[in-house]
Image (tube, rainbow, N blue to C red):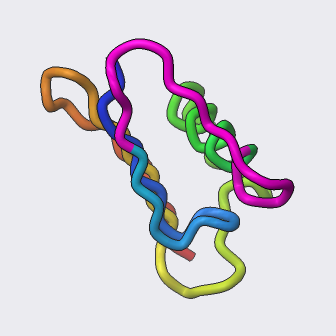
Amino acid sequence: MLRKLSIKHFQSHKNTVLEFSPGLNVIQGQSQAGKTAIIRAFELLRTYRPLGYRFHNTSSKDPVKIEVEVEDDRKITLEKTK
């Protein structure tokens, strides 16, 4: 089970940390709030295809970093520098 998702410098997310509870979790927000970027971050972790415009940071020179932590404290991390 997923415990935490961290997104740094990815699309509209400068430093976002989502902690998940057991069971059903819902992500909601206004239009253009970054909900789709969260789904894209999960998709990048799932497929490991960090190519193209979706895996970039135009607002900063800092590296893009997406990390997920699962139940037994294992972590999966993707990081891309320019």
Residue found 59% across the figure and 43% down from its top: 41
Compared with 36, 1 (above or below) is above
Name the chief secondary structure element in magenta: loop
Report the label total.
Answer: 0
- The quadrant in which residue 61 appears is bottom right
Front-most of 20 and 6? Answer: 20
Compared with 79, 82 (above or below) is below
The picture places residue 17, in percent across and down from the top left corner, at: 40, 54
Residue found 68% across the figure and 67% down from its top: 12
Front-most of 3 and 50? Answer: 3
Q: Is residue 22 magenta?
A: yes
Quick one: which residue is furthest to the right in this view?
31
- The quadrant in which residue 2 appears is top left
Front-most of 22 and 9? Answer: 22
Q: Which residues are magenta?
A: 19-35
The picture places residue 80, in percent across and down from the top left corner, at: 50, 62
Q: Is residue 62 magenta?
A: no
Quick one: which residue is furthest to the top in this view?
23
Residue found 28% across the figure and 36% down from its top: 69
The reply, left or right, for residue 77 in relation to residue 62 is left
